[in-house]
Amino acid sequence: MTETPVGRVPTAEDKARFWALIEAAWAELGSGPAELRRMLLTRDPAGDEENERLYEIDAFLDGFLERLAAVSADLSPFELVAMDRVLERALHDADREDIHEKTDGSDDGFLYARGHIVAMGREFHEAVLRDPRFAVLDGECEAMCYFFNGLYRERTGEEWAETGSGISRESCSNAEGWPSLQRHRV
């Protein structure tokens, strides 16, 4: 089996590289998606559910994922796992009840909504963590949720089952993000 950094905590360098890969993939798609991503960040999120422009970015997600695979082509299996650790943490950090209330959806749907939040880039992810109203109702990017795990599997023919991080990307697994669930478990 290929050596992987199971249990390794993402470093600042891993995080910077992860977000740089996301930005590089978007940059290759030109000014249209850049304008839409900027709009998502600069809009007034109060009462904008009727804004059809919120969903225009969806037309670019497949191209973004293709470009993300291309800009990740030189990553070693070890580096792919490291990128997955960053992805896992970003998804986990957005696994919060207040964000779910804005995005809606089932457990799987909320995971895909968090994939959308991550796919939009670091600035958008951080904006949603600060103010969940920035999240897009029913915005989804399922393929982002296990993107680097999928690349690892494609390139090595192997799977890793346990990340060893002690966290989960699955919905409702961030205990700090779901205070109402914690009250029911006590």
Image (tube, rainbow, N blue to C red):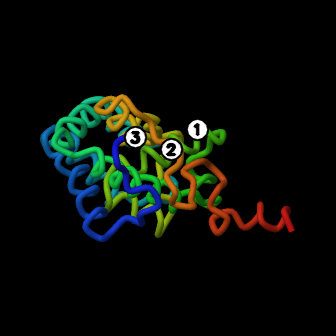
Q: Amino acid at mark 3?
A: Asn
- Real-space Cα separation, disc 3 to disc 2, in angstroms: 18 Å
Please tell me which residue lies in front, 73 or 44: 73
Q: In the drawing, does residue 156 fall left or right of residue 88?
A: left
At x 47%, y 65%, the residue is: 129
Q: Is residue 145 above or below residue 83?
A: above
> Marks 1 and 3: in contact by CB < 8 Å?
no
Residue 94 screen position, x and y as percent: 51, 58
Q: Name the residue carrying label 1.
A: 109
Q: Amino acid at mark 1?
A: Gly
Residue 5 screen position, x and y as percent: 38, 56
Please tell me which residue lies in front, 102 or 160: 160
Dot 2: within a 10 Å radius of its alpha carbon, few (fewer than 14), some, or many (20 or more) residues? many
- Real-space Cα separation, disc 3 to disc 1, in angstroms: 19 Å
> Marks 1 and 2: in contact by CB < 8 Å?
yes
- Real-space Cα separation, disc 2 to disc 1, in angstroms: 6 Å
Q: Name the residue carrying label 3.
A: 149
Residue 70 screen position, x and y as percent: 18, 36
